[in-house]
Image (tube, grey):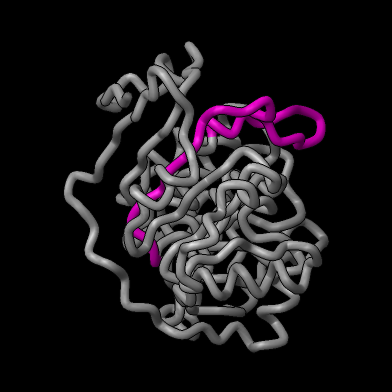
Amino acid sequence: MLIDVIPLKHTLSTDPFLYSISETWKDDIQIGSLVEIPVGKNIDLGVVSKIYMDTPDWADTNRSDTFELKPIIAVIASTPLLTMWMIESILQISKKYFIPIHKIISLFIPAPLLSRLDKKNYILEKTSLPEKRNPPMRTIHHFLSRIFSPKDLVAYSQKWDIFCFPDDLFALSFFPKDMEKSELILNESTSTKKSQVWMDMYHAKEDIIIWTRRILYYNLQAYKRILYIEDSFWKEQFQYPTRIRTLDILRALADHTNIDIVIVSSSASLDLFADFRDFSIENKK
């Protein structure tokens, strides 16, 4: 069996690396599993991005003069840390911006989170996933004469929703005082708290999440709908040596996830209409 792995530290390209698996680890491998791998003279951790049940035609392992196919060293966590749609989004963003793939995956699974999970031996509870719509909702709600307000947030709110605001101040100002405690504004003030939030979201500890666009990098499999508030002055995240548009992150998620996505805007940009032409448009008054 062969697998593609995205290394977490050492890459120079936008493509995963190919490895073989011994019979010892064959039953422990899943898409999103964390494995230990050799990368040149280094030992690295990586996330499994693809599993080949049969040897692909382009990987002729008999031609040792072409490349040496190395086996993984060990499976560190068989429980998937990333979903298939997160991995596909990572690949898409890496190729779009031509950024080494390890830099993109570090946005979705940062080193402090791995350290925290390692202390817990990567033990994560299985979460019952909510039933998703098929096909998922893809729509733009265009507010024509006013802006999205805290009252609208209450009206929109459903169980297993994620509200994605431009920044911390937006999120805090939109949190209605009359909402129940089951709603959560995330506390990312330290790496430890940010890692705890990741695990709480993985386990769906809160019914509704209200936070910033950083939430798009989390594992959202336990939630049903993303409500992305598009109005903002901050449309990019700096990632040396370039900047990544948040709309490109959302576009990648829309291309691969089965989570409903609603984009709310009162001053929609041309980029929004151009990049999300497949979304239906509903005018709101």
Tell me the quarter of the picture where residue 256 sits: top left
Classify the position of the C terminus by image quarter: top left
Residue 236 magenta: yes
Q: With respect to residue 167, does 248 lie above or below?
A: above
Q: With respect to residue 56, does 123 lie above or below?
A: below
Instruction: Determine the residue positioned at 68% across, 29% down.
Output: 234
Instruction: Name the one closer to the observer, 83 or 18.
Output: 83
Instruction: Determine the residue positioned at 78% across, 67% down.
Output: 191
User: Outermost residue toward the left?
Assistant: 134
- Residue 137 located left or right of residue 95: left
Residue 58 magenta: no
Instruction: Name the one closer to the observer, 181 or 9.
Output: 181
Instruction: Name the one closer to the observer, 238 or 86.
Output: 238
Instruction: Name the one closer to the observer, 16 or 249.
Output: 249
User: Outermost residue toward the front?
Assistant: 178
Which contiguous range is marked in magenta? 222-248
Q: With respect to residue 186, does 149 lie above or below?
A: above
Residue 108 can be seen in this image: yes
Q: With respect to residue 3, does 21 lie above or below?
A: below
Classify the position of the N terminus by image quarter: bottom left
Instruction: Determine the residue positioned at 72% across, 29% down.
Output: 243
Residue 17 can be seen in this image: no
Instruction: Determine the residue positioned at 43% across, 47% down.
Output: 153
Indicate the position of residue 81 as horizontal and vertical percent values. 53, 68
Indicate the position of residue 70 as horizontal and vertical percent values. 61, 63
Tell me the quarter of the picture where residue 218 sits: bottom right
Indicate the position of residue 59 as horizontal and vertical percent values. 46, 48
| Numbered disc total | 0
